[in-house]
Amino acid sequence: MKDIITKEQMFEYFRGNASIIQKHELESWLQNPDHVELYFHYLEEFEKQNLAFKADSESEIIKIWGKIENQSQPYEMKLNNLRKNTSVWVAAACVLALLFLTYLFQDKFFLKEYHSEYGKITNLSLSDGTKVTLNSNSSLMVPRFGFGKNTRRVILEGEAYFSVIHSPTNQKFEVQTSKDFKVEVLGTEFSVKNRNKGIQVLLDRGKVKIHYSKAKKDILMKPGDLVKLDKNGSISKEAVKETKTFTAWRSHKFIFDKTSLSELAIVIKENFGLDVNIKSVELENKTISGEIEAQNVDELLEAISNIFDLQIEKNNNTIEIY
């Protein structure tokens, strides 16, 4: 596999001039996720320099296929017009190849992904000025070429805290977690958690509206409200006294309120990607209340060990608690 594909080589590919070997080299090169970003950067630059590719792709395909299907002249005439016909096929192949690649990588083409690794917290500043703190083991998809005129929509997997800037045109900001669930705001501070156990939204400031397709009506939230959607599709809203309990992770803190060790095991799995094996039911039901500041999983495990006087062993991606 080639380590480097130059811009000139990429442009030749977009023009349809690449050989079979060069196409195979490009396909192998694109197996590296780091190269995909550069590919679309070159594609965008190429399209800007070749405005013919800015035309409506669907109508262009119809025109091209119309030309192809109308090639019903006698065989002798086709031979005489071989050069002309070949150019039509090359143009068709170029457009279809670009459309196919765009469809194949449509999420990567239209959306840019930010990912926070296990045990890491990532701070982002979006194009509209909105600030996002992305918790560990989380990803955020944002429009690659900027927000549209009507909405500012992002897609969240995991957990994030949003400080949304109010736009002069009252452009709403939407956090999509699934096709059935999204959070709509105009300007506010809130957290969204989208994990295996379900979805939860906590509002710190401002107002937000929850759209859930299976609910009878939208849910309006005020500061201090917590909305939960469990795995079974049941949704509820409650008021919480201490919102920092749900957002302390931004400062590498864990706040527990009668949290069982079995529930703590889920927190460790979500944030650090480690499986926790608790050796007895009695231990699973032990609870913890209080605040622990931990920059990494080892500091958290040490604190838990001291609080409960436990033996904790860490073997690769598994933690044993005795």
Image: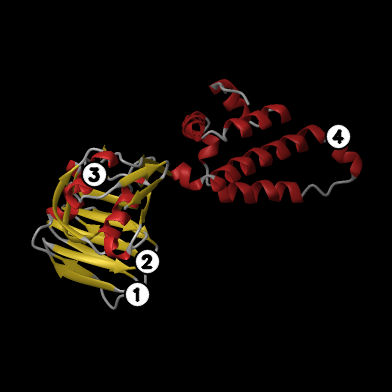
How far apart, in angstroms, are the residues tagged by discs 1 and 4? 64 Å
| Type of amino acid under label 1 | Lys
Judge the density around disc 3: few (<14), some (14-19), many (≥20) Cα neighbours within 10 Å: some
Residue 202 falls in image quadrant: bottom left
Q: Which residue is mark 4?
A: 80
Give the camera-side residue of 238 and 293. Answer: 293
Amino acid carrying mark 3 in the image? Leu
Q: Amino acid at mark 2?
A: Asp
N-term mark: 1 or 4: 4
Compute the Cα span from label 2 to label 4.
58 Å
Task: Look at mark 1 in the image and give the residue it sits on.
Answer: 214
Specify which label sits upstream in the sequence, 3 or 4: 4
Q: CA distance from mark 3 to mark 4?
A: 78 Å
Q: Are marks 2 and 1 in contact (CB under 8 Å)?
A: yes
Q: Position of residue 181 (x, y in %)?
A: 33, 64
What element does badge 3 sit on? helix
Give whichever of 103, 195 is nearer the camera.
195
Q: Earlier in the sequence, mark 2 or mark 4?
A: 4
The residue depicted at 26 percent of the width and 61 percent of the height is: 200
Contact flag, marks 1 and 4 (Cβ < 8 Å): no
Query: Which picture quadrant has residue 313?
Result: top left
Q: Position of residue 236 (x, y in %)?
A: 23, 72
Residue occupying the point 58% across, 45% down: 99
Labels 3 and 2: the sequence-earlier one = 2
Circle nearer the N terminus (3, 1): 1
In this picture, residue 258 sits left or right of residue 80: left
- Identify the residue position indicated by label 2 in the image: 180
Residue at mark 3: 300
